[in-house]
Amino acid sequence: MSSFGEAPDGTLYAISQFSGALYKVIVTGALPVKLISFSGKRNADISELSWKTATEQNTARFRIEFSKTASNFQNAGVVVASRNSNGNNYSFQHHISINSDLFYRLAIEEDDGQISYSSIIRLSSQKKGIKIYPTIINSGILNIQTGTPAYKLQILSANGAIVFQKELNGFTGTTTISIPQYSKGIYIVQLLLNEGIKTEKIIIE
C-alpha cells in the first residue's frame, strides 16, 4: 500500500507504507484538461466569455461555439491553450448583433485529437429599450437612452424639414442633448439605428 502526495510544482510522489521509500510518479499518456469554471455576460452586441483551467499540459486549443437554441452550435472563434501545468485564465469576446438569448460551450481539443465539451451556458440579451424623453420640452433638454448603437439624431418640423441633427457615432447608453430654442409646436425626433429608425413625437413649449 502507498500514499500519494503532490509537490508545489505539480510533481506526484508515492510513499511506501512498508519501507517509507519515496517514489516519483511518472504519468504516461495525455492528461485531459481540468476546467474549473466557464461563465459569460452580454454587453450590448458583445458576449464576454471567460473560463479557468487547473491543468492543461496536453490541451491544444479551445474552440468557442454558440447557438440560438442550445443545439446546432456554430464556431465563434478559437483560443490557443497556454499549456500551463498549473492552469490559466482565459477570455474571449464574441461580437454579434442579435436581440435574443445565446448559448455557448467550449470544445476542448487535445493534442491527440480528442474533443471534450464544457457545460452549456446561457447569456440573456441585455439590450435596453430605446427611449426618447421628455415628450414635452420646455427646458431645451432632450434625453436619449438606447442599448442599440445609434448613429444620428434628427429633429423635423411638422412639415418634414430637418431643423436639427447631431452625429452619435454608434453611441449606446444614456445621453442628454441640448437643442436650440424653436418656435412652440409639434416636432418629430428620429433616432437612426442599425436596425432602423426610432421615431418620437415631441412638443416644444
Image (cartoon, rainbow, N blue to C red):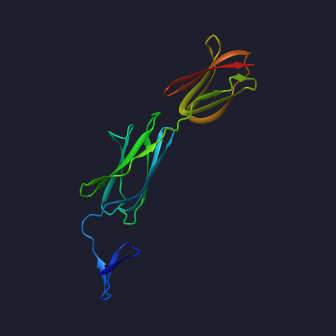
Out of 152 and 100, give the one closest to the viewer. Answer: 100
Q: Quadrant of residue 98?
A: top left
In this rendering, is residue 190 above or below 95? above
In this rendering, is residue 144 above or below 74?
Answer: above
Residue 41 location, x and y as percent?
49, 45
User: Which quarter of the rendered picture does the C terminus lie within?
Assistant: top right
**Residue at 63% in and 30% down:** 144
Q: Position of residue 104 (x, y in %)?
A: 40, 45
Q: Name the residue located 70 percent from the left edge and 18 percent from the top edge.
A: 203
The structure residue drawn at horizontal position 45% and vertical position 50%, both measured from the top left corner, is 39
Numbered disc total:
0
Q: Position of residue 132 (x, y in %)?
A: 63, 27
Q: Residue furthest top?
A: 159
Quarter residue 158 falls in? top right
Which of 63 and 14 lies nearest the eye of the viewer?
Answer: 14
Q: What residue do we see at 58% from left, 32% from top?
A: 146
